[in-house]
Amino acid sequence: MTRPILTAAAMRDAEAAAPVDLATLMEQAGQSLAEAASRFAGSMPALVLCGPGNNGGDGYEAARFLVERGVAVRVAALAEPATDLARAAHNRWTGPIEAFDTAAPAPLLVDCLFGTGLKRGLEDAVSQRLCALAGEANLVVAADLPSGVEADSGAILSPVPAADLTVAFGALKPAHRLMPAMARTGRLVLADIGIAASTDWFELAEPVLPPIAADAHKYSRGLVHALAGTMPGAIALAASAAARSGAGYVRVSTGAPIAGLPLSIVQTGDAKLSDPRIGCILVGPGLGELPHFLTLALTSRAPKVIDADAIALVGDPERLRGQDAILTPHAGEFAKLFGDLPGTKAEQALAAAAHSGAVIVFKGPDTLVAAPDGRLGFAPPAPAWLASAGTGDVLSGIIAALRARGMPAFEAACAGVWRHGRAAERAGPSMIADDLVAAL
Ligand SMILES: NC(=O)C1=CN([C@@H]2O[C@H](COP(=O)(O)OP(=O)(O)OC[C@H]3O[C@@H](n4cnc5c(N)ncnc54)[C@H](OP(=O)(O)O)[C@@H]3O)[C@@H](O)[C@H]2O)[C@@H](O)CC1
Ligand SMILES: Nc1ncnc2c1ncn2[C@@H]1O[C@H](COP(=O)(O)OP(=O)(O)O)[C@@H](O)[C@H]1O
Ligand SMILES: [K+]
């Protein structure tokens, strides 16, 4: 099941449209936070830090429910509650309230200072105190977001201690899946607080792949045609990944024999891209400065995956209009083609997709898949050991195979990114790109 991702503004709209009143939502949030924290930390004595807004309100509610669960709870407030909702939650907490500046640490720290309402960094003294209390705790649980991260961009506005667990209320926020914030959330739990989130933004989940028909033949299963360039190893990785991702036939146009390719992959001196059986053209890995290969690919009506060197060679995103293309840039390649776009990584990916008409896989530790129609998939965290040469080539090969197998462009890209990350988990930390192919 894919999990919806909402910006702070979309979250406020969803809360306002909820079938229950806001106080009930807050109570539900506090109850979920208490449940998740006590499941995670057992009966460890807790210090709940409450901010002035509704994130703080969640904290007062959670404190109440932690007491019901038998946890020794202390509450410390950064400021008086500033919203009616938070004030009501504060009034339901009957225990003492300590001052934030002087509260002693506890083994479990529950951070309810700020959530989606944070617009500027915490004051230095506040973030220092938060980090010090977190440093002395055994476990840190964040309510909705670790305090100091910006919900929509994933930016860190002031020093943020890494949480061990973050309980997201109602829906994930972009910061849960964008760097650098993603690395500070620890484990992520999504609590259902009773809102119905309807959105085109979601976290990628395990895809359903097209079945192999009982009467399949190699062409009906999907023909990937790859164009080799000056670095044959890269296209060999991509072509091998395509073959291991269920393409029925993988063919590589190459000027010289490529060593190390599986024998099942056909090497040819021709580049007949008008072949109507081609399910997807793959161009870019190891291409080098060969712009005419990209031009050749763009003359074909077949769907295409454009990766690596070919991305910079596009030059003008308008050239992609009317092409059935998936682009897989990392940040450097993205900037070369689309320039320095304003906004969050999510907004940049969507703008690039809308401008070019192509599906954009904006890679990195926080890979996004953007469609021209506004759909946006956020990859779940993938192992950092993917940061090695050739893993991007493997991704482009996987996506080309899924496209050739008949998945629509956006779905093929989403499925490819998800499978790439899981293959890396199976391959383990000493993995090189070759092993990633073997783990598919
Ligand atoms: N709405 C609902 O029904 C539900 C909401 N829920 C919860 O509410 C959270 C969102 O609540 P929120 O919008 O009140 O924002 P929140 O993150 O608490 O902070 C805003 C406050 O902090 C202040 N402030 C901001 N930055 C600051 C800084 N650097 N230093 C100091 N102050 C700063 C800001 O003041 P101002 O910017 O106006 O000066 C304002 O007072 C959400 O994440 C979820 O946990 C759930 O209970 C479900 C139901
Ligand atoms: N720190 C990281 N954590 C998770 N995934 C990463 C990380 N760094 C890179 N990746 C993934 O590894 C792949 C690298 O691709 P790319 O930069 O094109 O490398 P190459 O050109 O060498 O193949 C991308 O899929 C990217 O999302
Ligand atoms: K928080």
Image: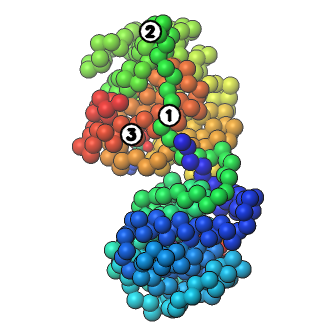
Q: Secondary structure at mark 1?
A: loop
Q: Position of residue 149 (x, y in %)?
A: 53, 67
Q: Which mark is residue 422?
A: 3
Residue 324 drawn above or below residue 219: below
Marks 3 and 1 sit apart, C-alpha to C-alpha, by: 12 Å
Left or right, 431 with respect to 74, comes to left
At 46% from the left and 58% from the top, the residue drawn is 188
Residue pushed farthest left?
A: 430
Q: Quadrant of the N terminus?
A: top right
Tag 1: residue type?
Answer: Pro
Residue that numbered label 2 is attached to: 218
Q: Secondary structure at mark 2?
A: loop
At 44% from the left and 90% from the top, the residue drawn is 103
Q: Which mark is residue 207?
A: 1
At 26% from the left and 20% from the top, the residue drawn is 260
- Image quadrant of ligand 1 equals bottom right
Q: How is the image coloured?
A: rainbow
Left or right, 329 with respect to 104, comes to right
Marks 2 and 3 sit apart, C-alpha to C-alpha, by: 26 Å
Q: Nearer the viewer, residue 19 or 273?
A: 19
Question: Is residue 437 among what the camera can see?
Answer: yes
Question: Is residue 343 among what the camera can see?
Answer: no
Q: Are marks 2 and 3 in contact (CB under 8 Å)?
A: no
